[in-house]
Amino acid sequence: MSIPSRQNRKQVFQFARAETWALKPKQGKGPKQWGIADVLAEALRAPENSKHVLSPAAPRHIAGMTREQLLERHDDLCRETIKPGGRKARPDVHTLIGAVYSWPYKPEETDVELYAEWVKRSLAFHSAEFGVVHAAFEHSDESFPHLHVYTISNDARDLHAGERAKRATSEKPHQAYRDAMVGWQDRFYELSGAPCGLLRLGPRRRRLDRDAQKAERHAAIARAKYDLRRQKEIEQGVQVALEKIIRPEAAKVAAGIAEVEVRKRELETALADVAALPQREAVMLAAASQRTKLIEERERSLAVLTSRLAGFETAEDMEFRHAEHERRHEFKVEETMEQDGVRPEHEGFLGTLRRRVGEWWRSFSLGNDYDEPGL
């Protein structure tokens, strides 16, 4: 699908057309019908599909996927557009819709800013009419630069304004097709053609002479440039307003939002702590109960030890008792000696005996091993 060469013609009005294709089109008795692969090959200027172009040149890929990616994802993209209750289209059902949008000035006559704006608006128009731009290529190897833009759908003819109008009526379907496509051209003119200085109709349809047509063309271009300049001025003014007024305020708002987020997180943390209090109290009560049981066990153990130690004397008590025994023993020995009339020369022997007996008695009372004193 390409634009016929117009080497000797002056195109100053818009040109746009749309068509649909299938993966494997039904072949009749006439010329071979192109399929999706052939159409995309022509868009990429494959030699066997570009014989109508005198000097084919590689196109510029400006949007969407490459040809290989588009063919690879064809089935997936069709499934994404299946209507509720529908099913995947057969290979001979048209699933690709393509449009050609032509710029009516040769490269050396083209205003670069207007052309860039026209490309942007043409892609936007295609997206609004047919859906996602799955692939778009720019050709500059013919008389006029033009775009090939493609969209895949499970029912591409339902996206085509003319085909959709034909389906909707059984009376005069061809007239319905033409009327729908006139409306489609009008919408393209409003969104893309007029803002970029293109004319909707050529001079023959309105029977304009050369001078009138030339004046109209210059006026359209001048108006488009003026509008584009005004648009840029407005955008620059908006940008300045953003820099001076809105962005500082936006920064304050962003800071306020950040602070609110911090407070929100703090509140969430506090609420989480409050929610965890019962669990913490339960843990503390369990720990306190465990400590109480341990203290009670230790108190019982201490009571048992105290009761056991109650029958034992302390070291001081034992020392006092031993001293008392020694004193009483010495007193009895002296008393016995006086009664028996022991002489003074015997007192040394008796004193030694008394001392040895005392030591033996102390050792016996303390539970120590001690040899029996010799006399």
Image (cartoon, rainbow, N blue to C red):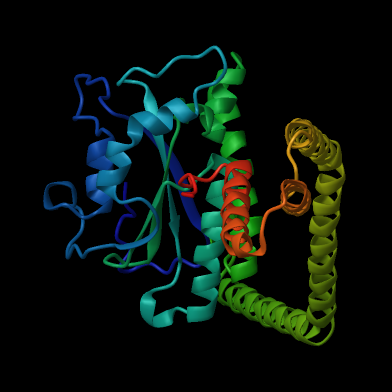
Residue 99 located left or right of residue 274: left
Which residue corresponds to the image point at 32% horizontal and 69% vertical from the top-left? 8
Residue 268 located left or right of residue 367: right
Which residue corresponds to the image point at 47% horizontal and 29% vertical from the top-left? 80
Q: Nearer the viewer, residue 269 or 374?
A: 374
Q: Nearer the viewer, residue 373 or 108?
A: 373
Whether residue 357 can be seen here: yes
User: Whole-percent x and y of residue 215?
Assistant: 61, 78
Q: Nearer the viewer, residue 148 or 298?
A: 298
User: Whole-percent x and y of residue 207?
Assistant: 59, 60
Image: 323 above or below 89: below
Which residue corresponds to the image point at 77% horizontal and 84% vertical from the top-left? 237
Image: 97 above or below 314: above
User: Whole-percent x and y of residue 279?
Assistant: 80, 36
Q: How many marks?
A: 0
User: Whole-percent x and y of residue 189?
Assistant: 61, 56
Residue 324 located left or right of residue 207: right
Residue 17 located left or right of residue 178: left
Question: Picture quarter containing residue 198?
Answer: bottom right
Image: 338 above or below 19: below
Whether residue 206 can be seen here: no
